[in-house]
Amino acid sequence: PNVVGPTGSERQLVPALVRQALAGRVSVQAGAARDLAGVDDMAAVISDLLATGRPRDVVNVASGVSVPVGEIVAAINGLLGVSPEIVLIPGGEAQRFATRRLTARLGTSAPMAGVIIVRTRLDSTVLTQCMQAGIKEAVPEQDLIALTKAVTRVGTATATLAATLHGGAGQSGAGRGKVHAVFSPKGGAGKTTVAVNLATLMARELGQRVALVDLDLESGDVAISTQIEPTRSIHDAVALEASLDSGALHSLMSATASGVAVLPAPLNPAAAADVSTALVGDVLALLVQDFDHIIVDCPPAFTPHVLAAFDRCDTISMITSLDLASIKNMKLALETMARLRMPAERLRVIVNRDAPDLALTADDVQEALGVRLAARIPESRDVQTAPNTGRTLAAANPSHPVVAALRALATTSIVQVVDVRESAPARSKPARRLGSRRAKVATA
């Protein structure tokens, strides 16, 4: 057996694995297993053999239990508190089952590990098994160019996403994360812009581990807004729904330059119909285990998927703009929330694109809706032009007035929970009624 003890040679299995784990990369032979025995136990066996007067006999000593090396690696990682990159060395087609078993264990014990599997033959079955095990890359055995690209992708994604999960300042990682939906009952209100920039500044400035889920399944723009080029999306979780775990889910996510972990909408809009409401709930249930905050960018409608997300939300930011149609739809949306018995303390009403030269003001909105606004985000062309520079506005210009408004929202109404469903504050001058301009907000 492999003898394990405090003074073992660095060439022995366990010391070698410990050294590799601390260095950040562990090489594992697929299907490999070892018989382990403690040095004290071996000393006791040798002492007993010598006591019986058999000093020249050849005796085979073993524990009788062959432990997969993958389990040994997982135990070492757990004791050391590390998640090294795992390099899986395949052992041929005969060891296919052992390979699947090892990668599945690694996907559970070290979901952030950057694993690349190299196979003689790749087919749809192998690729599905890789996703189920949380393996991010699979390449043909002789394709060195593909392997080089895969190593680069895995290295970058693993480093960035690991920093997102474990690099939060002062974060212990304990407790349940919070889910925050960004919703508008009318398209074009800027909900995606709010969601993306909110997630960015929470990750960059507040030291939070942030995930961003694009739930606009048919026309989501989170990927292009965050300047990522995903190859996988929430749709890839459909095939894994029965066995979806944290490792598999993380393999579908992409990290932004600001450290936000993004779960994109389906790359093909036609695939949206495959995503079930149950899957949405399962995804959010897994994400709250690993992130401090999960921002969900919702489509502009009360779809079953949106309602499934609302059921798990701690806050719902409802975005409106300063036009009659948007205010009317927001009033109807608030009434719908009341009929759904959504707790009022979860709701945050936000006016986006606030400008002094518009006929309606944020104060008009506040009075018409009967709520205290959680934020007033100013109008700025910089919001639309920032993605063209390859960065979100929150990353490119942290002192921008739009970012300042979002920062105030994050620190007072998202990270800190307050009740915003209350009467509008008293004003020193007579209220300007919407009806005074021959306009009336629909009341349902």
Image: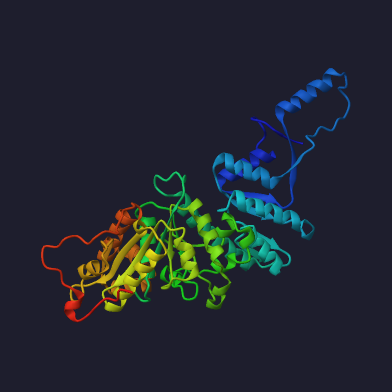
| Image quarter (top left, top right, bottom left or bottom right) of the N terminus | top right
Against 442, residue 204 (above or below) is above
Would residue 263 be found to the left or right of residue 7 on screen?
A: left
Against 182, residue 57 (above or below) is above
User: 168 or 45: nearer the eye?
Assistant: 168
| Image quarter (top left, top right, bottom left or bottom right) of the C terminus | bottom left
Q: Quadrant of residue 423?
A: bottom left
Q: x and y percent of residue 380 in the render?
A: 26, 72
Q: x and y percent of residue 291 in the render?
A: 46, 53
Q: x and y percent of residue 421 in the render?
A: 30, 59
Q: x and y percent of residue 123 in the render?
A: 71, 69
Name, please, the residue furthest toward the left. 429
> Residue at position x 58%, y 42% from top?
78
Tell me how the rendering is colored: rainbow
> Residue at position x 19%, y 60% from top?
425
Residue 140 in view in this figure: no
Report the number of discs.
0
Residue 173 in view in this figure: yes
User: 196 or 393: nearer the eye?
Assistant: 196
Q: Quadrant of residue 357?
A: bottom left
Against 438, residue 241 (above or below) is above
User: 344 or 417: nearer the eye?
Assistant: 344
Would residue 3 be found to the left or right of residue 15 on screen?
A: right
